[in-house]
Image: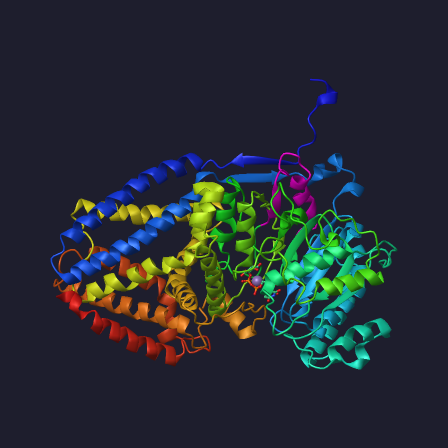
Amino acid sequence: MSAASSPPPLLNTLTPSRRTGFNRAFAAVYACAIVALFYRHTQTLLGSKTLVSFYVTLALFFSDLVLAFMWANGQAFRMRPVYRKEFPENIEKVVKTSDLPGLDVFICTADPYKEPPMGVVNTALSVMAYDYPTEKISVYVSDDGGSALTLFAFMEAARFAAHWLPYCRDNDIATRSPDEHFATNYWRSSESEKIKIMYESMKTKVEHIVGKGKVGEEHITGDEERRAFSKWSSDGFSRQNHPAVVQVLLDKNKDKDNTGRCLPNLVYVSRQKSKTSPHHFKAGALNALVRVSAVMSNAPIILTLDCDMYSNDPRTPLRAMCYVLDPETQKNLAYIQFPQEFHGITKKDIYACEQKRLFKVHPVGFDGLSGPNYLGTGCFFRRRALFGDPSAMILPETKDLSPDYVVNQPITAHSVIELAHHVAGCNYENQTEWGSKIGFRYGALSEDYYTGYRMKCEGWRSLFCYPEKPAFFGDTPINLLDVLNQNKRWVIGQLEVAFSRYSTITYGVKAKGPVMGLAYSYIAFLAIYSIPITTYSFLPQLALLNGVSIFPMVSEPWFLLYMFLFLGAYGQDLFEFIVERGTVQRWWSDQRMWMMRGLSCYLFGLTEFLLTSIGIPAQGFNVTSKVTDDEQSKRYEQGLFEFGVPSPLFVTLAMAAIINLLSFILGLVRLINGSNKEGLEMQMLLTGMIVMNCVPVYQAMALRRDKGRMPIKTTITASILASVVHVVASPLSM
Ligand SMILES: O=c1ccn([C@@H]2O[C@H](COP(=O)(O)OP(=O)(O)O[C@H]3O[C@H](CO)[C@@H](O)[C@H](O)[C@H]3O)[C@@H](O)[C@H]2O)c(=O)[nH]1
Ligand SMILES: [Mn+2]
């Protein structure tokens, strides 16, 4: 081959996982074992001598059916996992810097008290300082809290950016979120110390104002700022009811940093809200940004970020470009998803907040099919993908919003600003296709999952970019109740998809084929795990208390089948967890939280969803708090579970803990004095494992004195209910 025809520099590679063959073979064997299990269940069912034993077997049958359904769905992720690698250093060999596509970054925030403005500012600064041509970056901040405090913080941030950006570039700073940077062991110079002082004083000022709850006259400089804040003094301005506020804080054509180079666009947007029109939570906020940005910069690439997800690697956009610019991977490409990774998780990760399966194992599995689901943050979209399927673009109401529209006016032009306010209006979407066919989709609390899924059904694909060095770091709740509430919102949002006309098992399978349909179903139906988890946490234990055997005896061959099914599932899970850069300790926490979620938020999520479908009103999008109190953090560091405030979510968990402990102790006593009947060994094993998982619950109920212990009220309620369950279950011994 001559030099002239040498292949172009490599931008990315794809390697199928070596686990694939094993996964497929194991799935075949495991499927046979499941069939054998149902053969036995049917036999037992038909041979039931009493009504009680019939119902017990029926309950186990049904639980195992749910487990088998979820197992089958889960196999989709194991059929073709793939790993990708990018070579951002080759980008400049493929395309001139000036030809790189524009990048619009969307950052969502919704509450200045749950999401402190300084956190949002750090996120914004970290992406404004990307190693990417500055004139191509525009950052849009959506403030659903409609808060002057957030706007104030961003006015300060805009000034600080003039120092921060050149400092980062000239010193090749690795972590470009100021908070994180100054917390590391950074290289100290007179410049760095000057910037640090500047940063600290901005932070103090902003936090002071947030503490006071209002922006005082003395903090407002200039007419432009006064005009902006005057909107808040209008009558009846509240978070749920206010006009649109669009404020350009930095204009790349005018504003320069302190070395004279340009600064990226920075725009604050708080879309109009009115109590009478639905706002569709985050999806609504994102769609408002899609339109406002279309009018102002209309970049072909959009990065969506939550306010707590700062960039941990300035070269991340270049990494994404390795796919956007590759003719092979760009075909029908809708988005490039990065994993969600978190800072501040302890080694033990007691609440399994790493969510390894959701944020890493599944996307890797999805990637070999038609791509990962959208995870809500850390995702580079092609703007075009928000406007209908790859072959037929759906045109928005006006051409100015269309993805191929070329903006030819400055961002601060009067007509641009006016149009931006108009498209951020709360009635703008009436009688349009926004939320149904265009943009981020409405109708499910998990707008991320739903939007990605609908795009897949339209024929788009996506990619998972999973670099060694995390591209983003976010906050995760470190309080049990927050974790459970967050997960409850997620599963409700997923059930909304599962039981909609776009259900993954009907519409999904038709549009994307069985494997992709199964993969999406796994997530959609996650909450139904609560059925087997609850059954297995109560039924065998109540039977044990009554001395009734419900599983095969150790001497029976069926015992081996049960062992294979149990160890096979847990073993494969552990293996996958470790392969995706995990530890055994974290896996243990993960399986414990799986059980705990099954007994609380999945169960309540499923119930709440069923209640709403018969007309009982539902909760909206409850924003997760990004604030932690010091005592709580300390307990988290020590690995102590945080109960603290009473919640129904804790009651079922506590009930299971009590019943398991009692039946385990009783079983043990009977074992020692030799009065145990045969065939209770498996029940003892299962109960023992659940007791081990519940150790933090016992500690919280009986041994701890700190504020995070189980509220007495919850313990008493759970004990009473556990006794009731015990009494109700006494016919088991018949
Ligand atoms: O009415 C709303 C509600 C939320 N948000 C923003 O949405 C983001 C995510 O909210 P958060 O409370 O942090 O939810 P999490 O459960 O932590 O988020 C996960 O789950 C969400 C869907 O339930 C996804 O949108 C997120 O990207 C994903 O990280 C935050 O930036 C919020 O400011 C809005 O902009 N408007
Ligand atoms: Mn979050």
Foreground residue, 675 or 534? 534
Q: Is residue 427 left or right of residue 683?
A: right
Is 324 in the magenta? yes
Q: What are the residue bounds of the magenta stretch?
A: 313-338
Residue at image location 72% in from the left, 77% down from the top: 209
Looking at the picture, tell me which residue is in the foreground, 620 or 214: 620
Classify residue 149 by image quadrant: bottom right
Instruction: Please give left or right for residue 358 compared with residue 178 in the image.
Output: left
Q: Residue at x 29, y 78 (%)?
A: 720
Q: Is residue 247 visible?
A: yes
Image quadrant of residue 572?
top left
Which of the pair 70/243 is nearer the observer?
Answer: 243
Q: Nearer the viewer, residue 191 or 412?
A: 412
Q: Quadrant of ligand 1?
A: bottom right
- Rendered position, 82 above or below 617: above
- Residue plotted at (43% across, 54% down): 587
Residue 548 visible in image? no
